[in-house]
Amino acid sequence: MKKSITDKINRLKEEKNAIILAHYYAPSEVQEIADYVGDSYYLAKTAKSTNTDIVVFCGVAFMGESVKILNPSKKVLMPDMSADCPMAHMADIQKIEELRKEYDDLAVVCYINSTAELKAHSDVCVTSSNAVKIVKALPNKNIFFIPDENLGRYVAEQVPDKNIILNSGYCPIHASVTADQVKKAKEKHPNALVLTHPECREDVLSLSDFIGSTAEILDFAKETQNDEFIICTEDGVAYPLNVNNPNKKFHFVAENFCCADMKLNTLDKVLHVLESEENEVMVSDDKRLSALRPLDRMLEIAK
Ligand code: 13P
Ligand code: SF4
């Protein structure tokens, strides 16, 4: 059954000149058939450099939107239009406007996990793998970091010479990890290194051996000599971790540590959108042009 779905998907991809991009948090069988799998930064870059007519994006709404903003001539399809990131909505345009009045040199730095509307009101986008580099490179002293408070605080610690104003958004998945869970996992696996995504809370980050984006966690696990790890990020990374490191052990800090929205991207739905070309991502021209500026600036600075 699975084989025949995969065959149909591959045939349609060829017929329609389509590619499939998937985030590491998508289900493993979707990662398996995708042409490109990566973290948010890699996917944003890749989307810009491909020349197919159709992109099927297996992630959440802000990611599909970013692909469309960067590639207006391509048809961007999402397997499930209801796959959304709650954090993407957790910032307020009025607050941005108030802070712009208060600080002459304010830079609004917008984590890519945000709506196109929020991006359109920002100066530069960042992802978890380039946020520190980009904030350091900005000439501005005063920074409003939206929407993720935890990533913003982590960046502020790395760039102490800037005044980083935090916003109260958070990822309900990563922010649910507690220091207690990490301590218990360490007691159970004393030789394991703790690898953590910066969307986790401050007390969890302080118990970690390595902090990085999903791709950076994967690279670290592969490159380091250690063979046992406690993973504090979404459990979709189990698939590439195990494929890349068959002799290493990975323990997830919590059971069912998963983003339900990412898991909406099933193989059946991938096949359905390839067949029907339904679920096309649309962004109005006005919004697209305003949101393109901070995305392009990110790609330029992070190069
Ligand atoms: P990265 O892909 O940048 O690690 O972001 C994690 C995330 O939560 C994506 O939704
Ligand atoms: Fe959003 Fe968190 Fe899911 Fe990522 S893991 S898409 S930040 S809710």
Image (cartoon, helix red, strand yellow):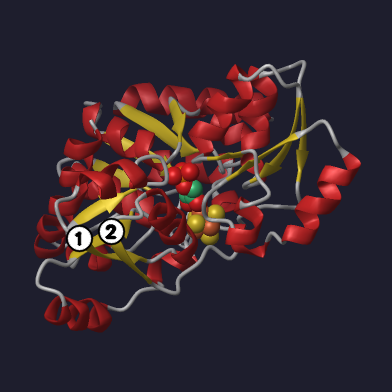
Please identify the quadrant where the C terminus is shown.
top left
* Amino acid on which disc 2 is placed: Lys
The residue labelled by disc 1 is 141
Q: Residues within 10 Å of mark 2 (few under 14, many from 20)?
A: some
Against 63, residue 23 (above or below) is: above
Q: Position of residue 279 (x, y in %)?
A: 37, 54
Are the residues tagged 1 and 2 within 8 Å (C-beta)? yes
Q: Is residue 209 visible?
A: yes
CA–CA distance in space, label 1 to label 2: 5 Å
Q: Earlier in the sequence, mark 1 or mark 2?
A: 1
Q: Position of residue 280 (x, y in %)?
A: 31, 52
Along the line of sight, the residue nearer the viewer: 41 or 276? 41
Question: On the rendered structure, is 86 left or right of 236?
Answer: left
Q: Is residue 255 visible?
A: no
* Amino acid on which disc 1 is placed: Lys
Tell whether circle 2 marks a residue whose Cβ is less than 8 angstroms from ligand 1: no
Please identify the quadrant where the N terminus is shown.
top right
Q: Residue at x 40, y 53 (%)?
A: 155
Q: Position of residue 110 (x, y in %)?
A: 29, 59
Q: Residues within 10 Å of mark 1 (few under 14, many from 20)?
A: some
Along the line of sight, the residue nearer the viewer: 186 or 31? 186
- Residue 220: quadrant of the picture: top right
Res. 90 mark? none
Q: Position of residue 300 (x, y in %)?
A: 17, 37
Total labels: the figure holds 2
Question: On the rendered structure, is 238 left or right of 98?
Answer: right
Res. 162 mark? 2
Along the line of sight, the residue nearer the viewer: 257 or 105? 105
Q: Residue furthest right?
A: 188
